[in-house]
Image (cartoon, helix red, strand yellow):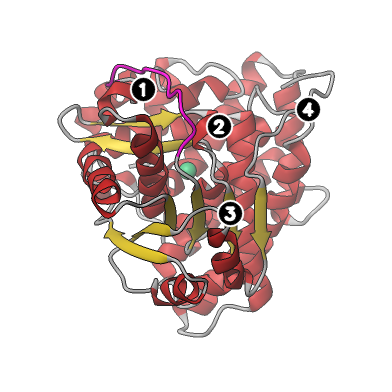
Amino acid sequence: MSAVGAIGLEAPARIETGPGALDKLGEIARGLGSHALLVTGRSNRHARAADLLEAAGLRWTRFAVDGEPTVATARAGTEAARAAGCDLVIGFGGGSALDAAKAIAALVANGGDPLDYLEVVGRGQALTRPSLPFIAVPTTAGTGSEVTKNAVLASPEHGVKASLRSPLMMARAAIVDPDLLAGLPPAVIASSGVDALSQVIEPFLSIRANAATDPLAREGIRRSAAALPRAHAAARAGKPIDPEDRQALAQTSLLGGLCLANAGLGAVHGFAAPLGGMFAAPHGAVCAALLPAVLRVNAHAVAARAPDGVAQARLRELAPMLTGRDDASIGAGIDWVSALCRDLEVPGLAHYGMNAARIPELVAKARVASSMKGNPLPLTDDELAEIAATSL
Ligand SMILES: [Zn+2]
């Protein structure tokens, strides 16, 4: 993190937030194209979006994504957009639908195959042409994909997830309407909510943290810590989530996307990338399982090797923001996160098939993951193995 307070922020040109923001979809879409590829999840929650497009005089073609997107998903969506003559792509759904839409918008404009551009397992060529205009409408509050410039695709043949990444992939508009979170099941609120929390905590502790992202991260940490336990309790009791808590969750996700795109992440996401490739485990759930152990091991490492550094000061600042208590110690902050994950019934990594025998393989992959570079300090293989073992 910069001691001189460097500022840097990339974001979509237009971000609409708040209850009813979805109503602006037709007007925004009309300014960007005439025939939209509407990329959605499996459910049929997109009817309202389709109505808004039709009322604004646009045609639309649906492309449904089943689970987290793969290289094959991106190929099929690109084909569908070309066949229908789409000049605009709208992602309407969770992170899977948004990432698929973002990849499709880039591939239609640039031609070629996803593996030409994919990091790590592909050829990693740079995208050279701006994506088709892309509008992101999240219906969960986790990934922040609506404001990031990468799309994560799984490559089952390589057993990893990797990104298409370019500033040219940024959405032209993000529409973040907390009313779309109504009716989410408690397990989705838990995994996506702790993922969003990790996506404001990791950029705050990142070595790339900067003066533009810090205030956004602090805001997200406070809002999420207050709202997430209440929202989960309401959903578990079958009650509607308080509108202000819905708003806080939606905004934490958005703030997390802005922070991670501009300040990087850390060990939680360094592990999440290879785990997502090794097992059929949803991204948010994996991040939620890892967050307590990553904080604990990082805090130990920082206390041992950099006790007077910026990371130590950041960890100290984190605890009161999480707990709401000014005198909370670093340990109390981490205990609060552990208790939150217990209360939210976040399953461990074993739930997705991870076991002790595969820890060396996981550590070898996590060590070189791009997100690991943001971690407040480099962790040893023993420390990485401890995180994996504690998160089982
Ligand atoms: Zn995440």
In the rendered image, which quarter contains the N terminus?
top right
**10 Å crowding of disc 2: few (<14), some (14-19), many (20+):** many
Question: Do the residues bearing badges 3 and 2 touch, measured as CB atoms within 8 Å?
Answer: no
Amino acid type, label 1 = Glu
Residue 100 visible: yes
Q: Does the Cβ of the disc 2 residue fall within 8 Å of ligand 1?
A: yes
Magenta stretch in the rendered image: 121-131
The residue sitting at 51% across, 59% down in the picture is 137
Amino acid type, label 4 = Ile
| Sequence-first tag of 3 and 2 | 3
Magenta span includes 127: yes
Q: Taking 181 as reference, is 91 left or right?
A: left
| Residue named by callout 4 | 7
Where is 271 relative to 376, above or below?
below
**10 Å crowding of disc 1: few (<14), some (14-19), many (20+):** many
Amino acid type, label 3 = Ala
| Residue named by callout 2 | 265
In the rendered image, which quarter contains the C terminus?
top left
**10 Å crowding of disc 4: few (<14), some (14-19), many (20+):** few
Q: CA distance from mark 3 to mark 2?
A: 21 Å
Q: Taking 283 as reference, is 174 left or right?
A: right
The residue sitting at 41% across, 63% down in the picture is 188
